[in-house]
Image (cartoon, rainbow, N blue to C red):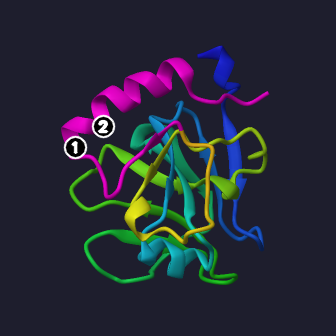
Amino acid sequence: MDDWKLPWEGGCMCGGIRFRISAPPLLTMACHCTGCQKLSASAYSLTMAVPTSGFTVTQGEAVVGGLHGPHRQLFCPHCKNWMFTQPHGLDFFVNVRATMLDDHHWYVPFVEVFTSEKLPWATTAASHSFATQPDLEGYAPLIEAFARDGARPV
C-alpha cells in the first residue's frame, strides 16, 4: 500500500470543494462515450474508480449536474467543475475525475471504454481497450491486473 503514497488531496478549480482519497483506486480509465465528451468538453474523460470507503469530501458540498439521471455526476456549485460520479447501483466506488487531484501527473488510464464512439484522432496509453464496456464480471480481472501493474505516483 505504501507505493500508492496515500492519502491524496484534490479539489475543484475554485477550491470550494475539497476531497481526500485514502484507499488505492480499483482502476483508472478513459471513457470515449459521447456523454463524457460533452460533460468534459474534451475527447474523453479521465477517471479513477475509488472505493467509497476511501473517498471523503472534506470541504464544501457538491451538487448534481449533468444528465440528472440515475448516475449522479457531481459538480462544484460555484466553478461548475465536474468532479466525480456516483454510478447508480454501484455504491462500492466513486468515479473521481483524475485531473481533480492536486498531483495527477503520474496518472495513466489502464482501461479505455467506448472506443466505438471515440474521435478518430484521440488516443490514450491504456493497456486495455473496449468498443463499449465490459460487463460487471469482466472488470474483476482488470482490477486484479491494475492492482499489479497500474501506474503509481512517483
Q: Is residue 130 magenta?
A: yes
Q: What are the residue bounds of the magenta stretch?
A: 127-154
Considering only vertical position in the picture, is 141 above or below 64? above
Which residue does the image show at 77% across and 74% down from the upper left? 14
Considering only vertical position in the picture, is 136 above or below 47? above
Which residue does the image show at 37% across and 50% down from the upper left? 130
Question: Label 2's element?
Answer: helix
Name the residue carrying label 1.
136
Q: Position of residue 7 (x, y in %)?
A: 66, 33
Q: Nearer the viewer, residue 5 or 109?
A: 109
Q: Position of residue 1 (x, y in %)?
A: 58, 16
Q: Nearer the viewer, residue 133 or 59?
A: 133
Quadrant of res 11:
bottom right
Name the residue carrying label 2.
139
Quadrant of res 153:
top right
Q: What type is the residue that disc 1 sits on?
A: Leu
Q: Is residue 11 magenta?
A: no
Q: What type is the residue that disc 2 sits on?
A: Tyr
Location of the C terminus (image quadrant): top right
Which residue does the image show at 74% across and 46% down from the upper left? 104
Whether residue 41 sits left or right of residue 86 in the image: it is: right
- Whether pointer 1 and pointer 2 mark residues with C-beta atoms closer than 8 Å, the reply is yes
Q: CA distance from mark 1 to mark 2?
A: 6 Å
Q: Position of residue 55 (x, y in %)?
A: 51, 45
**Mark sitting on residue 50:** none
